[in-house]
Amino acid sequence: MRQDSKNDLVYCLRVLEAIGKIRLYAKDFEDPYSFFQANDQKEFNACLLQLIHIGEQSNRISEATKGRYREIPWNQIRGFRNLIAHDYVGIDKLIVFDLIRFHLDELRQSMAHLIRTEVQRGRVFRKGIRSVEK
């Protein structure tokens, strides 16, 4: 369990970056079948890698920060990361597409809210903010 929250901003920003990449990779697909079959599954596999990354970064966020944002499904994020990492071949393409299309934006909004709130309250490593704004 992480208790040190000084790097939480970095982890949250990495989650937002991964979400942005997933949105870019999946933007041209209207259905899960074309998404899965396109370009020898290149975009699909790239999205799975970014979903794993989201789970990894989310898991690094301190318990104190997670406790303040219980509306974010931390356990589900970690669980989905584990599912992808350990049962890669058995991943349901429909679930992945549904997650990307209908739930990822909600996570993006929640993470952006978390970052804004934590920065306003002075709970994050401020040096990282200046370098991001440049």
Image: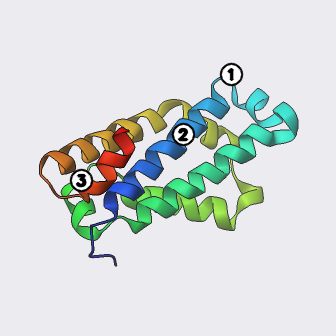
Left or right, 80 with reference to 74: right
Within 10 Å of disc 2 (Cα), the crowding (few <14, some 14-19, many 20+) is: few
Mark 2–mark 3 distance (CA, rounded to whole Å): 20 Å
Where is the C terminus found, in terms of image quarters? Answer: top left
Left or right, 67 with reference to 133: left
Mark in front: 1 vs 2: 1
**Residue 46 occupies which quadrant of the picture?**
top right
Please name the amino acid that badge 1 sits on.
Asp
Position of residue 41 relative to residue 68, above or below, is above
Closer to us: 107 or 24: 24
Residue plotted at (23% across, 42% down)? 116
Please name the amino acid that badge 3 sits on.
Tyr
Q: In the current view of this chain or complex, which residue is farthest to the left?
A: 121
Q: Which mark is residue 64?
A: none
Mark in front: 2 vs 3: 3
Within 10 Å of disc 1 (Cα), the crowding (few <14, some 14-19, many 20+) is: few
Q: Position of residue 72 (x, y in %)?
A: 32, 50
Where is the N terminus found, in terms of image quarters? Answer: bottom left
Q: Which mark is residue 69?
A: 3
Disc 1 vs disc 3: Cβ atoms closer than 8 Å? Answer: no
Q: Secondary structure at mark 2?
A: helix
Residue plotted at (77% across, 36% down)? 36
First of labels 2, 3 by sequence position: 3
What's the image's color scheme? rainbow
**Residue 82 occupies which quadrant of the picture?**
bottom right
Q: Position of residue 128 (x, y in %)?
A: 33, 54
Q: Which mark is residue 28?
A: 1
Q: Which residue is mark 2?
A: 99
Q: Position of residue 64 (x, y in %)?
A: 22, 67
